[in-house]
Amino acid sequence: MQNAPVLLSLDLPDADATESFGIAMARILRAGDVLLLDGPIGAGKTHFARALIRARLGGAEDVPSPTFTLVQVYDADPEIWHADLYRLTHPDEAVELGLEEAFDAAICLIEWPERLGDLAPENALLLQFSLADAGASRRVLLRGAAEWAPRLTAFGQV
């Protein structure tokens, strides 16, 4: 997945831009979509996920980080699974969480996706978050199969 072509590169100058991006992504997702949220601590992965989940749920619902619970499941149509795999030590632990089944039927947001090993679906979209400078500015590269390209056109071009 790391070697998949970059479909889109976005600068997110502040937390509001990250939130707006999450809201916009929420509009294009459907059952079976898996977003792999990669990047260092503080790069905006959870902020993005919260905005996306709230947008799908249609309100200001409390969206805690799943760092300690590992997975939060939200009752939506389709269901939303938000997983933080930081504490996993082996991909087999991801299997025990039921993620493989969720990949088929839910919208899945996976933080620390490298902990999945080979379990990551081939049709997943990798969002690589990085800190662009010492301030709040971030950059996100979206990598994935060409099937994602038409759905990402609303965000512009690389």
Image: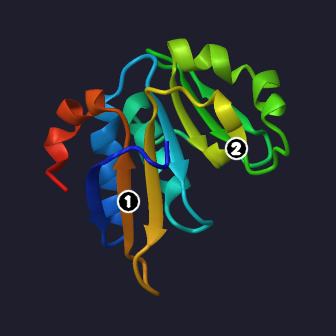
Please tell me whether residue 10 is drawn above or below residue 24 in the rendered image: below
Q: Residue furthest front?
A: 3
**Residue 122, horizontal then vertical, whole percent:** 49, 27
**Residue 134, horizontal then vertical, whole percent:** 46, 87
Left or right: 154 in relation to 29:
left
Q: Residues within 10 Å of mark 2 (few under 14, many from 20)?
A: some
State the count of labels: 2
**Residue 58, horizontal then vertical, whole percent:** 37, 31
SS for callout 2: loop
Residue placed under numbered mark 2 in the picture: 66
SS for callout 1: strand
Left or right: 87 in relation to 72:
right
Image quadrant holding the C terminus, namely bottom left
Left or right: 65 in relation to 3:
right
The amino acid type of the residue labelled 2 equals Pro
* Of marks 1 and 2, the one in the foreground: 1
Q: Is residue 34 visible?
A: yes
Please tell me whether residue 1 is drawn above or below residue 76 in the rendered image: below
Q: Earlier in the sequence, mark 1 or mark 2?
A: 2
Residue placed under numbered mark 1 in the picture: 140
The amino acid type of the residue labelled 1 equals Val
On residue 59, the disc is: none
**Residue 94, horizontal then vertical, whole percent:** 76, 30
Residue found at x 83% / y 32% = 93
Residue found at x 52% / y 41% = 36
Answer with the quarter of the image where residue 40 lies. bottom right
Front position in the image: 102 or 126: 126
Q: CA distance from mark 1 to mark 2?
A: 21 Å
Residue found at x 37% / y 76% = 137
Answer with the quarter of the image where residue 16 lies. bottom left
Please tell me whether residue 134 is drawn above or below residue 58 in the rendered image: below
Residue found at x 32% / y 66% = 12
